[in-house]
Image (tube, coloured by chain):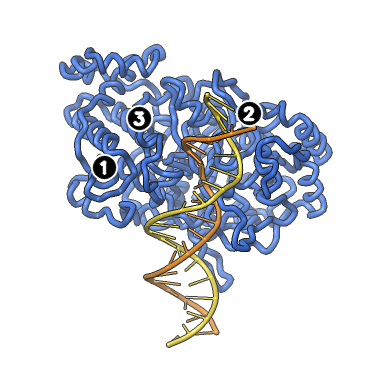
Chain colours: A blue, B orange, C yellow
DNA sequence: TTGCCTAAAACCGGAGCAAA
DNA sequence: TTTGCTCCGGTTTTAGGCAA
């Protein structure tokens, strides 16, 4: 595992991004499922934002509206699921919409018609069973869907033995294939790929599988730990020192140990020790530690993020893992792998409804399930990447790359505070004074201040017509970037508007203006909406779009060598 | 077709800040 | 001092996935 040198203390401000998703509920880890390629991008949740007065577009409105109308699915017959809903059958699949040079309008229309007419065949209902691999280079991009996993998502995975699982937040898009094609259409086929707001790291892992040398960064510990494992891990850590401990051997040889090991399934060649280590950790003696006290049922804080038993088991496993590291029984690599396994297991039994912004008042069924650790699915065939945990704007000045991928936060939610529980679990090993650390936990939901993990990209601000903190940070980042190819993924509903992003990229590349026709794409999908229409509430409908339709933007710019030197 | 379960965005109230 | 806006913390709802 190649670990980048830890960064100096983080300055307050720019470049923060939580799990981006996305997501601890960790936006994530699907890219490591056993398939060679496949677009499974994940996004962060939206926050409410002020209405946009108009839909800024590089394509004329009549043309866009025509495209949207043609891409709308045919009306569904009554009797099908959801057809009598006031939203007119919201269960219909989202409609892919790609504009621009890779597909002409005529081609797009023809494809849209084909898609609509063959929708049922193209997107059969998900069902359990073997998952079919999907190539990222397939002719049709995967449909985008709001806030849901595809078949390979958590439910299916959770049922499969030994598979990595994580509930995702905000994964409203499936963009990996689109990003890959977007780059390939511009002649980019390899080199170093820097995902500076990595979140779950799904994009970085995807490009790692394609042979890129990936650099991944995020500010959150919970994201960092996973990326050390899924992006930075080059080989299976050595657990021989742990497995020769008499108590560990006894534990694994016992009835529960054998059952636990069996439940994990067959280990891939060379990973038998990893599976045994995970089983040993899963059987750690439960303890009443910080997680139980602060976040579990029965704990004195009264926060219902975990059941009583799971809270104690998380504490027991965490404390045992720390002891193993302290005694030299596991090395740093092994520590990260086991910690990632624990983080994912805890996430699966968290009593929440998507984010950790609030716990549910009663334990939901999944939270009553016993904590189950699973070995992370390591990608050992692709080149290992480097992982950072730091300020994006500072880091792009230090780390050069062929491709810089930017997927900054685009809403006003600070992710550290929406995913504080996994963040606490992930960073707890860094606390030198546990009592002082615990004393800083406050509020109904057990937040920590996380001042060092606030992101300028979540700040709208900018009254009186001036640029927002978000826009300032973005302009600074692309100006300072030391990369030839810059790709930006951003939500249509985000803080930045299209013109601001284009202007910043043009300025960074020394262009008079950004060429939206050539280097900008919109991928359309359906917005997830949990609220019904009530009390006269009016939901924003973007101009030229169907109700609940929202787009994901892709931007590209090539930075000439002179600008890269100048910005360094 | 039914019904359970989950996701994740919206709601709401309050604090803080800057302009008028 | 008032007004209007952003930001934050806490909570809930329900569309849609999925299994039976």
Q: Residues within 10 Å of mark 1 (few under 14, many from 20)?
A: many
- Mark 1 residue element: helix
Above or below for A292 versus A162: below
Tell me residue A135's x, y (percent): 62, 24
Residue at (65% x, 48% y) in the render: A551
**Residue A567 visible in image:** no
- Mark 2 residue element: loop
The one nearer the camera, A43 or A57, is A43
Q: Are marks 2 and 1 in contact (CB under 8 Å)?
A: no
Q: Which residue is disc 1 drawn over?
A: A291
Does residue A254 appear left or right of residue A268 in this picture?
left
Residue at (65% x, 49% y) in the render: A550
Tell me residue A408's x, y (percent): 52, 49
Please give the chain letter of the residue carrying mark 1.
A
Above or below for A186 versus A465: above
Q: CA distance from mark 1 to mark 3?
A: 16 Å
Q: Which mark is residue A125?
A: 2
* Callout in the foreground (1, 3): 1
Q: Which residue is disc 3 drawn over?
A: A341
């Amino acid at each position: 595992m190649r670990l980048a040198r830890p960064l100096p203390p983080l300055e307050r401000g720019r470049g923060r991004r939580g799990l981006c998703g996305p997501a601890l509920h960790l936006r994530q880890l699907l890219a490591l499922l056993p398939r060679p390629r496949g677009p499974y991008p994940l996004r962060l949740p939206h926050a409410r934002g002020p209405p946009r007065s108009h839909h800024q577009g590089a394509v004329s409105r009549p043309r866009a509206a025509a495209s949207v109308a043609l891409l709308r699915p045919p009306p569904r017959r009554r009797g099908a699921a959801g057809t009598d809903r006031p939203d007119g059958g919201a269960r219909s699949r989202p409609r892919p919409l790609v504009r621009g040079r890779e597909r002409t309008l005529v081609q797009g229309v023809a494809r849209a018609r084909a898609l609509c007419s063959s929708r049922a065949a193209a997107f059969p209902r998900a069902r359990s069973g073997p998952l079919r691999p999907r190539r990222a280079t397939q002719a049709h991009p995967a449909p985008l869907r709001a806030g849901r996993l595809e078949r390979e998502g958590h439910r299916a995975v959770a049922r499969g033995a030994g598979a990595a699982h994580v509930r995702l937040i905000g994964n409203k898009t499936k963009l990996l294939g689109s990003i890959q094609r977007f780059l390939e259409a511009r002649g980019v086929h390899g080199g170093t790929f820097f995902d500076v707001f990595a979140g779950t790291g799904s994009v970085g892992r995807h490009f790692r599988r394609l042979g890129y040398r990936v650099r991944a960064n995020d500010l959150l510990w919970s994201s960092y730990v996973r990326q050390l494992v899924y992006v930075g891990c080059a080989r299976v850590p050595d657990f021989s020192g742990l497995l020769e401990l008499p108590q560990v051997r006894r534990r694994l040889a016992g009835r529960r140990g054998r059952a636990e090991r069996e439940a994990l399934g067959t280990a891939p060649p060379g990973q038998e020790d990893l599976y045994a280590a995970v089983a040993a950790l899963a059987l750690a003696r439960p303890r009443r530690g910080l997680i139980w006290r602060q976040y579990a049922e029965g704990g004195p804080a009264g926060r219902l993020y975990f059941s009583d038993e799971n809270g104690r088991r998380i504490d027991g496993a965490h404390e045992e893992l720390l002891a193993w590291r302290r005694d030299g029984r596991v090395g740093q690599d092994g520590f990260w792998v086991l910690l990632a396994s624990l983080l994912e297991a805890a996430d699966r039994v968290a009593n929440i409804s998507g984010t950790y912004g609030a716990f549910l008042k009663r334990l939901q069924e999944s939270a009553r399930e016993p904590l189950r650790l699973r070995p992370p699915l390591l990608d050992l065939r692709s080149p290992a990447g480097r992982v950072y945990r730091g300020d994006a704007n500072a880091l792009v000045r230090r780390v050069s790359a062929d491709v810089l991928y930017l997927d900054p936060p685009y809403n006003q939610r600070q992710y550290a505070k929406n995913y504080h529980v996994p963040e606490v679990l992930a960073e707890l090993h860094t606390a030198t004074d546990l009592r002082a650390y615990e004393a800083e936990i406050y509020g109904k939901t057990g937040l920590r201040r996380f001042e060092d993990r606030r992101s300028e990209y979540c700040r709208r601000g900018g009254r009186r017509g001036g640029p927002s903190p978000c826009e300032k940070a973005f302009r600074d980042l692309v100006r300072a970037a030391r990369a030839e190819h810059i790709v930006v993924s951003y939500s249509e509903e985000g803080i930045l508007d299209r013109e601001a992003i284009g202007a910043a990229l043009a300025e960074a590349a020394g262009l008079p203006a950004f060429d939206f026709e050539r280097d900008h794409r919109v991928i359309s999908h359906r917005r997830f909406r949990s609220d019904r229409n009530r009390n006269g509430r009016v939901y924003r409908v973007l101009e030229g779009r169907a109700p609940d339709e929202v787009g994901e933007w892709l931007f590209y710019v090539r930075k000439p060598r002179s600008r890269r030197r100048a910005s360094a």
